[in-house]
Every structure is written in C-alpha cells, then in structure tokens.
Amino acid sequence: MAVMPATENNPLYVQGYLILRGFMNSRLLSELRDSAEALWEAEGENAGAEFRMEPGARRLANLCDKGDVFRRIVVMPEILAAIGEIIQNPFKLSSLNARSTNPFSADAQPLHCDTGGIADEKGFWVANTVWMLNDFTSENGATRVVPGSHHWRKLPQEVMADPQAPHPDQILVTGKAGDVVVMNAHAWHGGTANRTAHPRRALHGFYTRHDKPQQQYQKKLLGAETLKILTAEQRQVLAIDDPLNDELSATGHSRSGFLK
Ligand SMILES: O=C(O)CCC(=O)C(=O)O
C-alpha cells in the first residue's frame, strides 16, 4: 500500500480520503461481518447505547471490548501508517463503532466534521477509517464527501444554509465489501439514504491526536478481562497507560459531529 507524505501530490492530503481497495481478505471480512451481526442480535435495542443512537441506522459502540478481531484491526500497520499521514503527531484510537443504515431508510446524515472539529494551529487532529462490510453503492447509503473541505477550517453548518442538502462538490465514496476508506475526518462528510432492501454495514475506526479527548474513553469502557489480554501495541494505541489521556478523557465529554 502506498502511503505518501502530506504534500500536494498526496491524494489523502489533497482530497481528504483514500480507498484501500480489497484491504480485507474474505476471512477477515466474514469474521467482522459475523461478529457485528451477532452483537446486533445480542444487544437488541440497546445496541450503540454506550455512545449515541441514530434514527434509520443500527449502531454498535465500544467494539474494542467486544472481540479479538476488533482489537486486531485498529492496530494494523497499514491503517496506522495511513492515519499517521493525516495526524502528524502521536495519535490514539478515539473509538471503534459500527453503523448499518436500515433498508429503505430515507434518513441521511448532514454533512459534518467528526467531533465538530476543524484543524487547529497544530494541524489535523481527527481521522476515520470506514471498513466496508458490504458494497457501498450509489443506492445503498454510501458515504458522501466534499473533497478538499478539510483545508477550509470551517464547519458545514457555518457555511451551508442546510448541511442536509447536497453540496455541489460532493462525491459518493463507492466500493466493494472489503475496501477500507481512510478519511481526514475534518473533511465534510456524511452517510446517505439507503434506497435498497438490504442494510449497508460498516465499521468506523476513529483516531484522534494525543492531546484531544477520546470519543470513548477506552480505559473506562473496556472490561477488566479485556484490559488483561491487550497486547502492548493495543495498550499504546488505545492510550491505556497515558496520563494525559486520563486527564482529557475521564470527564466523559465525548462528542459526535452531529448526533445529540
Ligand atoms: O457510515 C457512514 O457512511 C458515515 C458515518 C459518519 O460519518 C458518522 O456516523 O459520523
């Protein structure tokens, strides 16, 4: 996989996203899909409750506590390398969630920046990975992105009369099950409506700079058994032994780009 420095020649820097085509092999894809479905089944109407519920979509939260396969993907070297091209400082996992848009759901997300944040004087501080567990098509709720908008240092709601409306420069990120989108999460983006009879499922591995709070404070949310079996690398990426993260995240002011 070619991950490049943050320069004008780097599409991740210029456009704000990169698609790692066929990143998941079929075994990993099935394992992730089956694990997510089993959790939706088991958690029922409480699914996603550790973070936020969303109309028209099933969600899951705190996935690093819910299976080895989830803990493995957040530390994959190619993923960490790509995130490091966006957040050029030490970074950590902020959360690992799943989101599945319901069949025939007209609910779509407004354009937003994750955690409602724009780049600051130190640069970009949020990055997301969208793991396609299904094909993303123009019909089933693929993510829309406004390429380059992460450089504008403005939120959609400050500029657009209606962030729910289509933006003239938006594109739909389509792809195949097994692809992973790496995205500068300051880029304006959002899930679209699903006009098909099948759910559109994805995982979101969300990362933030070391000096910002985690969206989901991993040290508090992970159970004692999980904490015991984390590898050294997982502990580091999840900021388990990081006093600054304790200070920043313990107050529990986790934010979404738009969900209340
Ligand atoms: O699932 C998607 O297509 C995008 C989701 C997203 O941007 C969010 O939930 O904040």
Image (spheres, rainbow, N blue to C red):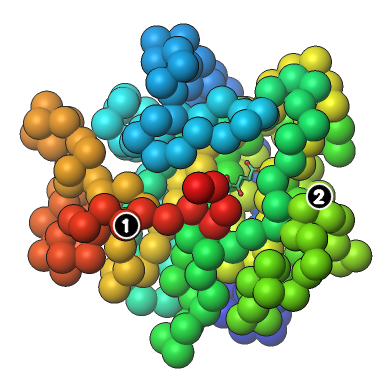
Which image quadrant for residue 104?
A: top right
Specify whether residue 233 is in view: no
Which image quadrant for residue 155?
A: bottom right
Q: Is residue 77 left or right of 240 when viewed as pictured?
A: right
- Reply above or below: 43 against 150: above
Q: Quadrant of the N terminus?
A: bottom right
**Residue at label 2?**
172
Q: Label 2 is placed on what type of residue?
A: Leu
- The secondary element bearing badge 1 is classed as loop
Q: Label 1 is placed on what type of residue?
A: His
Q: Is residue 210 left or right of 240 when viewed as pictured?
A: right
* Residue 130 percent coordinates (x, y): 58, 44
At horizontal 32% and vertical 68% (from top left) the residue drawn is 212
The furthest residue to the right: 168
For disc 2, the neighbor class at 10 Å (few under 14, some 14 to 19, many from 20) is some
At horizontal 86% and vertical 32% (from top left) the residue drawn is 139
Q: Is mark 2 within 8 Å of ligand 1?
A: no
* Residue 88 percent coordinates (x, y): 42, 76
> Which circle marks residue 253 in the picture?
1
**Which mark is in front, 1 or 2?**
1
The furthest residue to the bottom: 121
Q: Nearer the viewer, residue 26 or 253?
A: 253
For disc 1, the neighbor class at 10 Å (few under 14, some 14 to 19, many from 20) is few
- The secondary element bearing badge 2 is classed as strand
Q: Is mark 1 within 8 Å of ligand 1?
A: no
At horizontal 57% and vertical 35% (from top left) the residue drawn is 54
Q: Estimate the spatial distance between the alpha carbons at disc 1 and disc 2, rounded to whole Å.
A: 31 Å
- Reply above or below: 234 against 102: below
**Nearest to N terminus: mark 1 or mark 2:** 2
- Reply above or below: 135 against 130: above
> Which circle marks residue 145 in the picture?
none
Q: Which image quadrant shows ligand 1? A: top right
